[in-house]
Amino acid sequence: MLKWALDVGQFDLEYCSRTAIKGQALADFVLEFDSEVENKAIVLTEPSSQGNHSVYVREEFPRPWWILHVDGAVNNNGAGVEIVLITPEGHHLMSAIHFKFYVTNNDAKYEALINGLKIALEVGVVNLIARSDSELVVNQVNGGFQARGPRTELYMRCAQRLLEKFGSARLEGVPREENSNDDALAKMGSQMDSVQLGKIPLGIQEIPSIPEVGVF
């Protein structure tokens, strides 16, 4: 030890005790370099007022936000919807659904939203921003417009109940011109054009979504 002290004595060194790492700094580090791990949490040690024991506190990290784009289309060839679910990392999960039952244009917009919300729940999404170009649907679900007719009211209540199942969720309106790609895919689904859809999954829906949710 004496020899070591003589060797380093020529340098202006000062001993400093190690400082504690703040919990938020460690949490930010884990979030930045471990984005693939779900249900992230960190265990922090807090000093206890009783003796030398420590109290371990588990802090859950904030859940990332997913984005859902939906659109529905009705034409002479039939009706269908398009669903695009975007992960926090920017990956697009796309699907289209063709209806085997009669729907109006507004029904198709509601079916698009309801099916999109169901898919998001199935994959375990907690925080969601849903977007639709239907001003009517957005305002009815958000409480700005009153639903007219029993069928529309059932669709509205169905969408509202699904939104309540998320940790945090909101429905936003987008201009139709910003939804052009979604509208094109929805039209393909309405035509049941599997050639144009390519690798995009195409589902067939036999009955409306309303009875399946039990909102009567």
Image (spheres, grey):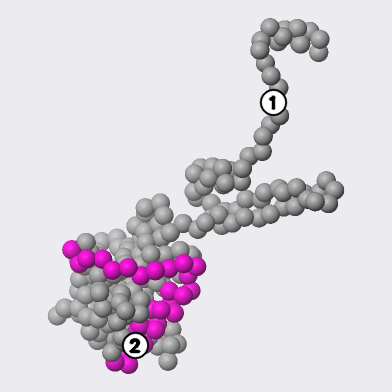
Q: Which residue carries the number 2 mark?
A: 153
Q: Which residues are magenta?
A: 149-177
Q: Examine the image and state in which quarter residue 22 appears.
A: top right
Examine the rendered structure and indicate whether residue 66 appears above or below residue 35: below
For marks 2 and 1, the one nearer the N-term is: 1
> Relative to the observer, which residue lies in front, 140 or 195?
140
User: Residue 52 location, x and y as percent?
Assistant: 83, 46
Going 30% across and 63% down the picture, which residue do you hit? 200
Name the secondary structure under disc 1. Answer: loop
Type of the residue with mark 2? Glu
The answer to whether residue 118 is seen in the rendering is yes
Q: Is residue 173 magenta?
A: yes
User: Residue 131 location, x and y as percent?
Assistant: 32, 67
Q: Which residue carries the number 1 mark?
A: 16
The crowding category of the residue bearing disc 1, from other C-alpha atoms within 10 Å (few below 14, some 14 to 19, many at least 20), is few
The answer to whether residue 192 is seen in the rendering is no
Q: Is residue 80 left or right of residue 20?
A: left
User: Residue 173 location, x and y as percent?
Assistant: 28, 68
Type of the residue with mark 1? Cys
Going 75% across and 52% down the picture, which residue do you hit? 55
Going 36% across and 87% down the picture, which residue do you hit? 154
The span from disc 2 to disc 1 (Cα, nearest Å) is: 68 Å
